[in-house]
Image (spheres, rainbow, N blue to C red):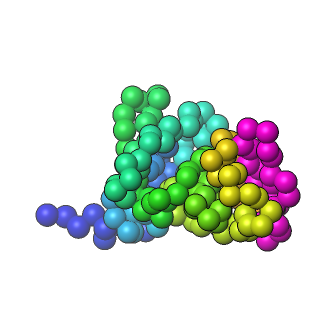
Amino acid sequence: MADWSDLPRELTVYIAKSMGSLEEFIVFGSVCRSWRSAATKENYFACELPSTRQVPLLMLPKKKSATTCKFHSLTKGKLCELDLSEIEGKMCLSSLGWLLTVSKDLNFSLIHPLNHARIELPDGHPTLPPAFLEALRKFVLSSSPSWTSNYIVMVHGFSSLAFCRPGEDWIK
């Protein structure tokens, strides 16, 4: 039996760049550690099909005890699973491919579901009231943290809007 994790790095990078869709890229990166190391954002954006043609994946509601999340591909009508145990017990919203996680005590983080990159955001206390969590409905990034450190995180809940830049306090 062949050990696929021992393929030369140049070959795994070439294969990663040959993926035709985000779904294929995700599956490729989940094969083993060496293949995951080739499944970088640089290699994804070097894929033959430009990412601008990609339809976003829909994240399905996660069961409380599960450590994986299911994503639905609208273009292929298929489900794929990703291990996202770091969002366990937290509210989760998405924007520009990033997930915003919010704990019950209003600790905010950004998590990228493909490479598990994590960005800690300012604590929501004392700026945001505890009831803000129940009212939280939308989350928007001004630009992707994958490409710039100059972005704004905005959250909206009913009639409240709050925003922050990483390293700065929330403004309501």
Viewer-closest of 43 and 88: 88
- Residue 60 image-quadrant placement: top left
Q: Is residue 91 above or below residue 71?
A: below
| Residue at image location 39% in from the left, 28% down from the top | 77
Q: Is residue 83 visible?
A: yes
Q: Is residue 46 above or below residue 79?
A: below
Query: On the picture, is 117 further left or further right than 38?
Result: right
Query: On the picture, is 26 further left or further right than 162?
Result: left
Q: Give yes or no for residue 151 being in the magenta stretch.
A: yes
- Residue 139 percent across, percent down from the top left: 69, 46
| Residue at image location 80% in from the left, 52% down from the top | 162
Viewer-closest of 129 and 141: 129
Query: On the picture, is 102 further left or further right than 148?
Result: left
Quadrant the N terminus occupies: bottom left
- Residue 86 percent across, percent down from the top left: 48, 64
Q: Which residues are magenta?
A: 150-172
Query: On the picture, is 91 further left or further right than 9?
Result: right
Q: Give yes or no for residue 17 being in the magenta stretch.
A: no
| Residue at image location 34% in from the left, 55% down from the top | 66
Q: Is residue 40 above or below residue 97?
A: below
Q: Is residue 50 above or below residue 104?
A: above
